[in-house]
Structure formats: C-alpha cells, structure tokens
Image (cartoon, grey):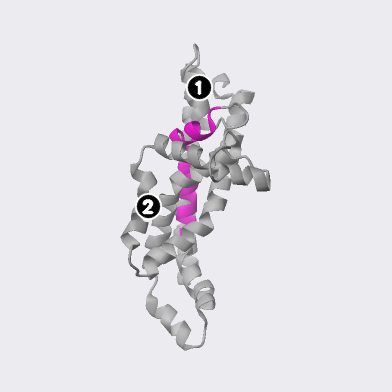
C-alpha cells in the first residue's frame, strides 16, 4: 500500500492537472462548438485553410506550439504585454498558461468530435423548424444543440483527457515549477530525472492511466445515455 501512497508534491501535481484541464475545456468549449458549426454548416473561400489551422496542433511538435505561445503570450510578446499592461494578467510561467497550452493542443480533438456529431444532425429538421417560424438562434438552441450534445460531451471529455497528458507545449511555455505549473506529466518527468525516483514515477504513470481511462469510459457512457434521451 505504501507504493500507492502519493506524496504531497504528487498530490499537488494531480490537483493542478485536474484544475488546468477543467479550465482548458471550459475556455475552449464555446470556441470549439462555434468552429465545428462553421466547418460543418458553412461554405466559403478559404475553408480548407481554416481546417488546416484548426488541426495544426495535431501535426506540429508540441514544443513548437509552446514556443509560439511563449513568443505571443509572454510578458514581452505582443499579446502577453497587452494583457499584463491593461488587465494585469500574466499567462507565461503560470497555471493559466498551462491551461492555455492544454486548450490549444486539445482543441482539434474537441472540434472533430463536435463536427462529426453535427454532420449527423439531419438538416431537414432544422429546415422544418425554420418553416414553422423559428429564427436561426432558436433553431440552433432548440433543435441543433440538443441533437449534437453527445458529440459535445465526447469532445469535452476527450479534450479533458488530452489536457491531462499535455507535456511538450506546457513545459516550453510555462516551465516546470512545482506547485505552480508542474502538472502530472511534468511531475512524472521530474521523477525520472532524479535518483530513486522510479517508484514515484510509476505511481504517477499508473495514476495517469487510471484518470485517462476513467475520462474515456465516462465519455462513452454519457454520450450513449444522452443519445438515448434525445431519441426518446
């Protein structure tokens, strides 16, 4: 049982990972739904470019994403300096930066899940609602959104699980500061770099697997249950 006992530092890394992942999903979900709707329901010049930009984090090395975030959102960056000057918000080397890095890396998975769900919604149902006098917003919130909710749930939980495992962009953008930016993967990495850290690293490895599996199983169960409710 001693092997399963987490140290205060490991518990802090777990709590911070859950906090960062929750914020990453909360911040990116509205943008993810909007982006998925644009990709699924509209046609415009340059759409392929938007698709490429949305999915870019999937193919770029995470370190590149982290470096770009540091350049743009750092204290001397064009966006980061404005945030600090006018809002007093510092993103780099802070948990907020870790949440931002996780959100960027998980965004493509979220958009893809929501878009696939939206593409399975029958446009005829939306058209029927419009013929009955419903406006675009009412159609979206009363017809489209309920039918695509299973995809939103799946996308949100997949993004949460992806955020829990984010490493490269996070360590590049916000470093590895215990109690401040050291999430579960960063804590595991730190333990692999010190003597006698094998048992702690294995604990965090198993914990990461358990949390990720719980998120994925939860996603499957929730999406199926909600889909059954929608079908009536």
Q: Residues within 10 Å of mark 1 (few under 14, many from 20)?
A: some
From this viewpoint, is residue 216 visible?
A: no
Q: Which residue is drawn at 53% across and 72% down?
A: 141
Q: Nearer the viewer, residue 74 or 95?
A: 74
- As drawn, 220 above or below 193: below
Is residue 227 visible in the rendered image? The answer is yes
Residue 19 position in % (x across, y down): 60, 41
Q: Name the residue under label 1.
A: 190
Query: Left or right of 55: which side holds 142?
Result: right
Q: Is residue 148 above or below residue 168?
A: below
Task: Indicate left or right for 8 with 194 as reference.
Answer: right
Q: Does the magenta stretch include residue 105?
A: no
The residue range painted magenta reads 152-176
| Relative image position of residue 186 (x, y in whole percent) | 50, 28
Is 147 displayed left or right of 43 in the figure?
A: right
Q: Dot 2: within a 10 Å radius of its alpha carbon, few (fewer than 14), some, or many (20 or more) residues?
A: few
User: Residue 214, how many percent across, how many down?
Assistant: 49, 43
Q: Residue 206: image x %, image y %?
A: 47, 30
Label 1: state its secondary structure. helix
Q: Read off the residue under disc 2.
A: 53
Q: In which quarter of the image is residue 125?
A: bottom left
């Amino acid at each position: 049982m001693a092997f399963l006992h987490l140290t205060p530092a490991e518990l802090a890394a777990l709590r911070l990972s859950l906090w960062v992942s929750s914020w990453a999903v909360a911040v990116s979900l509205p943008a993810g739904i909007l982006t998925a709707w644009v990709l699924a329901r509209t046609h415009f010049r340059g759409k392929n470019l938007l698709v490429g930009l949305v999915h870019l984090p999937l193919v770029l090395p995470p370190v590149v994403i982290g470096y770009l975030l540091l350049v743009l959102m750092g204290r001397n960056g064009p966006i980061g300096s404005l945030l600090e000057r006018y809002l007093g918000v510092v993103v780099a080397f802070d948990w907020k930066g870790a949440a931002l890095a996780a959100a960027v890396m998980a965004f493509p998975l979220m958009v893809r899940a929501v878009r696939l769900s939206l593409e399975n919604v029958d446009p005829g149902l939306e058209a029927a609602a419009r013929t009955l006098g419903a406006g675009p917003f009412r159609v979206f919130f009363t017809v489209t959104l309920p039918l695509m909710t299973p995809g939103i749930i799946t996308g949100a939980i997949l993004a949460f699980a992806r955020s829990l495992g984010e490493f490269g962009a996070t360590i590049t953008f916000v470093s590895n500061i215990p109690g401040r930016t050291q999430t579960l993967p960063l804590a595991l990495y730190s333990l692999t770099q010190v003597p006698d850290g094998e048992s702690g690293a294995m604990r965090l490895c198993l914990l990461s697997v358990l949390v990720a599996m719980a998120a994925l199983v939860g996603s499957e169960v929730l999406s199926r249950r909600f889909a059954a409710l929608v079908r009536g």
